[in-house]
Amino acid sequence: MRAVVTGGAGFIGSHVCERLLHDGHEVVCVDNFLTSSVDNIEHLMDDHRFRLVPEDVTEGLDVPGPVDAVLHLASPASPVDYLRLPLETLRVGSAGTWHALDLAAAKGARFLLASTSESYGDPLVHPQPEGYWGHVNPVGPRSVYDEAKRFGESLATAFRRNRGVDAKIVRIFNTFGPRMRPDDGRAIPTFIRQALRGDPITVTGDGSQTRSLCYVDDLVDGLLRMLASSHGGPVNLGNPHEVSMLELAQWIGKLTRTTSRITLIPRPQDDPERRRPDITLARQVLQWEPRTPVETGLCDTIADFRRRVDAEEGRRIGSPVTAPPLHSEVMS
Ligand SMILES: NC(=O)c1ccc[n+]([C@@H]2O[C@H](COP(=O)([O-])OP(=O)(O)OC[C@H]3O[C@@H](n4cnc5c(N)ncnc54)[C@H](O)[C@@H]3O)[C@@H](O)[C@H]2O)c1
């Protein structure tokens, strides 16, 4: 298979590229490095089956030669990024998705849209099944991301219905793992960065808001199962195990053995209260569910961050990550 991965230099995209190459496929990675760096794909550059196209997908997407699959991941994804880049986010979710779908239509390729649990907004139904239409503030600050993704879902569905494109939609819930940017503002990278530096671990609100956390290898496995399936989606991909932000901060504090204290700070506007995927459909149609224990994923992520923080700052705080403590020990 020859696959085009837009946003292939990003956190999830780089793992997708890596896995596709590992499985014996050719990869064309299209990325303008808006929210990532070439460091994420440096290790893939020597592989003759890997090609980097350093372009903006909103300007058009022309890939010569055959293409069997288009995986459209290009988009700012963390709140810090899309609040800083509102118009770029709307443009890549609309024009960028359109170009990626046009490419799939022209090449007769399968298409996969990386949509998001943010399509559900601040949900009134819990956990969220795919049939729930969501609770989104269309003019709130997060709308640039939520509505761009909802438009992308609508567009992919129209290409499926009217242009015969084998378009699939996955709604990704919070995913974490190595190669997240330490400054991307999401809870796990923020807490790990703060813990490794010995800075206060900043939890928003009273920390009772929850997220469900899926390790990136599991997520990538779900994406590729979806690509191979005959199902159009949307299909939720995420870990139904729910963790409060306060528990997560305590957990990371223990795993990093930091001296940092937890500090409560104000919550951002429209920050969802709870998020948990209903993955019944993914279990049924993809035979997929997350397999990596969250603490194992956290240890891998902490080790990756420690390497990068060390490289950047030349100093180490806390002791090395060793075997993870038992879950119950951590959460107590
Ligand atoms: N990480 C998560 O928890 C999560 C959750 C839900 C959905 N998603 C979706 O998964 C995808 C990847 O997310 P991520 O966490 O890896 O984010 P990321 O910011 O690390 O990666 C996004 C990549 O897209 C690239 N990009 C952005 N605009 C572009 C453009 N116009 N042209 C070319 N490249 C462009 C960026 O440079 C970056 O490499 C996104 O579409 C995101 O919405 C991620």
Image (cartoon, grey):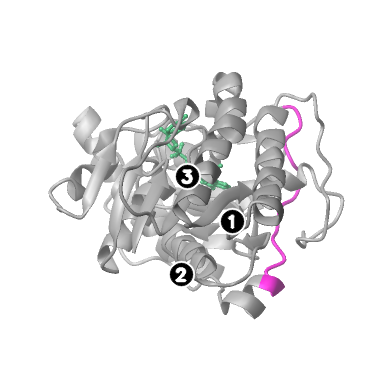
- Residue picked out by circle 3: 103
Task: Find out whether residue 111 is within the magenta segment.
Answer: no
- Front tag of 3 and 2: 3
Q: Residues within 10 Å of mark 1 (few under 14, many from 20)?
A: many
Q: At 48% from the left edge and 57% from the top edge, which residue is drawn?
A: 108
Kindly state the secondary structure of the residue where label 3 is placed: helix
- Write down the residue under mark 2: 292
Instruction: Report the quarter where the N terminus lies.
Output: bottom left
**Which label's residue is closer to the chain start, 2 or 1?**
1
- Residue at position x 84%, y 43% in the image: 135
Query: On the rendered structure, is 33 left or right of 133?
Result: left
Which amino acid, by three-letter code, is at mark 2? Thr
Query: In this image, 185 relative to 86: left or right?
Result: left
- Amino acid beneath label 3: Leu
**Left or right of 193, for residue 250:** right
Q: Amino acid at mark 1?
A: Val
The answer to whether residue 245 is above or below residue 130 is above
Magenta stretch: residue 277 in it? yes
Q: Position of residue 75 (x, y in %)?
A: 52, 36
Residue at mark 1: 165
Q: Which residues are magenta?
A: 269-281
Q: Earlier in the sequence, mark 3 or mark 2?
A: 3
